[in-house]
Image (tube, grey):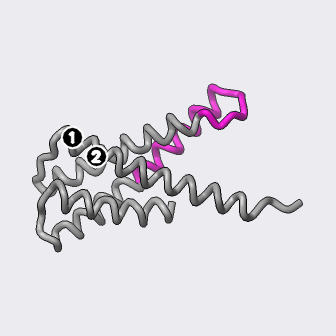
Amino acid sequence: MTWFAVTNLIGSFLFVRKFARLPVDISIGAGIAMTVASVAACAISLVACVGVRLLFESSESVSWIIPALLVSALTGALSGIGVLAAFRQKIARSAFCWLIVVNLICLGLTVYRTWTFICAHPAVA
């Protein structure tokens, strides 16, 4: 989750600067709070998706990862909107969609970096 936290911190800060129009010092605090909430929400939703998959599916395919990432991005965006509501910011629907895109990009970079690490360091028996 380190890659996700770092990319989400950058993405959240840029999102707050673009859409919330807060001062820089408050934007930094909001970006950090959004990142903490988003990492927690995404981790919980990924664990829930994996748990549901293990309970109800017996195949070993990786087709479950797409819905898990979509649900994680949505819960991360909802938690980010909750944080911005605590800062008394109202976010339009289009901005909410952009926040989902930011979370999807961050999750995509995390999956890519994890996959390249796994490929570069194969298991040794």
The residue located at (43%, 55%) in the rendering is 106
- Cα–Cα span, label 1 and label 2: 6 Å
Secondary structure of residue under mark 2: helix
Within the magenta stretch, is there residue 55? yes
Would you identify the image quadrant in which residue 114 lies?
Answer: bottom right
Within the magenta stretch, is there residue 39? no
Image coordinates of residue 30 in percent, x first then y, are 22, 63
Image coordinates of residue 37 in percent, x first then y, are 34, 55
Nearer-the-camera pick, 59 or 45: 59
Above or below residue 61? Residue 75 is: below
The residue located at (28%, 41%) in the rendering is 97
- Residue marked by disc 2: 98
Marks 1 and 2 close (CB-CB < 8 Å): yes
- The amino acid at mark 2 is Trp
Seen as rendered, the residue at the extreme right is 125
The residue located at (43%, 63%) in the rendering is 5
**Region rendered in magenta:** 40-63
The residue located at (16%, 50%) in the rendering is 85
Secondary structure of residue under mark 1: helix
SS assignment for the magenta stretch, majority: helix
Above or below residue 21? Residue 66 is: above
Q: Which mark is residue 94?
A: 1
Image coordinates of residue 88 in percent, x first then y, are 10, 53
- The amino acid at mark 1 is Ser
Task: Tell me if mark 1 has few (under 14), some (14-19) or many (20+) residues whose alpha carbon lies within 10 angstroms of its own.
Answer: few
Image coordinates of residue 45 in percent, x first then y, are 46, 42
